[in-house]
Image: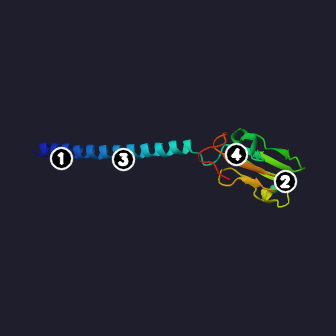
Amino acid sequence: MKFSNVCKKFQSSLRENKTVFLLCAILILCVIISLAVIMGRKKSVPENGRYARIYQNGTIIRTIDLSAVEEPYQFTICGADGEENTIEVKNGEIGMISANCRDQICVKMGFIHSAAMPVTCLPNHIVIEVGSSSEENEPDGVAY
Ligand SMILES: [Zn+2]
């Protein structure tokens, strides 16, 4: 009778193991699903903006896909009254590297890579804004 006892024990432990295994499987599945949801969310709302939009006097004069920039480059925007703003574009970043404005606030702001803080040159009416879309009125855009 010892054998059947062992057998029963084995069977019951097998049943317990099955329950534990099932619980583990459910737990792992939950983790995978929540990870997938988090990853999916991260994909749809990137932390860093992809497009830089440059405004002069309130209108977009240039849109740059920052993720497509391979080599850093610079260009200068000239205003009607002799304003000059030199902008440098890097992969994922954009900034004002020189300007002939009085305050130089735009140059001091450095490089930006998100919509959190647009580079603004008030005297020269230049705004560099970074966002996830190349379109103007994006829902999470910065109002100014
Ligand atoms: Zn400035």
Residue nearest the viewer, comparing 14 with 32: 32
Going by the numbered disc 4, the residue's amino acid type is Gly
Q: Identify the mark nearer the N-term, 2 or 4.
A: 4
Q: Position of residue 27 (x, y in %)?
A: 36, 47
Q: Is mark 2 within 8 Å of ligand 1?
A: no
Q: Does residue 33 lie above or below 144 as drawn?
A: above
Amino acid beneath label 3: Leu
Q: Earlier along the polypeptide chain: callout 1 or callout 4?
A: 1
Between tags 3 and 1, which lies in front? 3
Residue at the image position 62 percent from the left and 43 percent from the top: 138
* Front label number (2 vs 4): 2
Whole-Å distance between the Cαs marked 1 and 4? 63 Å
**Is disc 2 placed on a helix, strand or loop?**
strand
- Report, in whole angstroms, how far the alpha carbon at label 3 lies from the one at label 1: 27 Å
Pick whichever of labels 2 and 3 is earlier in the sequence.
3
Quadrant occupied by the N terminus: top left
Q: Label 4, on which residue?
A: 92
Which label number is shown at residue 9? 1
Q: Is residue 133 visible?
A: yes
Contact between labelled residues 3 and 4, with CB atoms less than 8 Å apart? no
Specify which label sits upstream in the sequence, 4 or 3. Answer: 3
Give coordinates of residue 86: x percent, y percent: 84, 49
Q: Is residue 6 left or right of residue 108?
A: left
Q: Identify residue for label 2.
A: 98
**Viewer-side residue, 31 vs 102:** 102
Q: Which residue is mark 3?
A: 27
CA gap between label 2 and label 3 equals 55 Å
Disc nearest the viewer among 2 and 3: 2
Disc 2 residue type? Ser
Q: Secondary structure at mark 1?
A: helix
For badge 1, the amino acid type reads Lys
